[in-house]
């Protein structure tokens, strides 16, 4: 499975996972400038959540969430700011990371790190 297909599959799994937990997915793959946020959703408590999804077919080089370094975090935060400006939102926000590990194309593990950075 090529990287783009792997990433899309992981994002689909993460979106379904969030919806099952009571989140309302508002936007997927929001782009602004040089940045992108994989999933933007409203938590059951009404918080606007910006979710970075990392998908791997093996856990051998550390967990997928470890790929979200400071540079990537800053890029996500800038893109989140652009989204909030677009919709005129000034309320509570959170940055989460969802890691999806696939085995044979099927989810083996899903880890959801809430309030993962900033």
Image: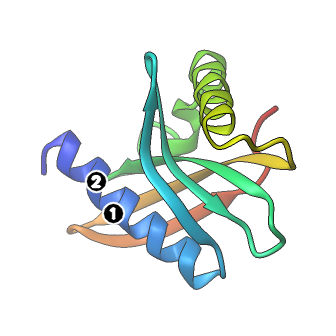
Q: CA distance from mark 1 to mark 2?
A: 12 Å
- The numbered mark at residue 53 is none
Q: Quadrant of residue 74?
A: top right
- The numbered mark at residue 8 is 2
**Residue 13, image x, y percentages:** 40, 69
Residue 21 in the image: above or below residue 33: below
Residue 69 in the image: above or below residue 114: above
**Residue 85, image x, y percentages:** 68, 32
Question: Which residue is drawn at the image coordinates 64% and 73% (left, top)?
Answer: 23
Direction from residue 37 to residue 89 in the image, left or right = right
Question: Which residue is drawn at the image coordinates 45% and 59% (left, top)?
Answer: 100
- Graded by Cα atoms within 10 Å as few (under 14), some (14 to 19) or many (20 or more), the crowding at tag 1 reads some
**SS under mark 2:** helix
Question: Which residue is drawn at the image coordinates 86% and 49% (left, top)?
Answer: 92
**Residue 38, image x, y percentages:** 46, 46
Residue corresponding to mark 1: 102
Residue 87 in the image: above or below residue 20: above
């Amino acid at each position: 499975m090529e990287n783009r297909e792997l990433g899309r599959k992981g994002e689909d799994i993460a979106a379904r996972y969030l919806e099952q937990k009571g989140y309302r997915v508002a936007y997927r793959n929001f782009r602004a400038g040089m940045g992108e946020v994989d999933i933007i959703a409203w938590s059951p408590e009404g918080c606007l959540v910006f979710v970075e999804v990392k998908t791997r077919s093996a856990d051998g080089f550390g967990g997928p969430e470890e790929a979200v370094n400071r540079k990537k975090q800053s890029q996500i935060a800038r893109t989140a700011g652009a989204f909030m400006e677009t919709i005129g939102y000034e309320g509570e926000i959170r940055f989460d990371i969802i890691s999806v590990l696939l085995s044979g194309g099927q989810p083996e593990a899903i880890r959801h790190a809430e309030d993962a950075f900033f």
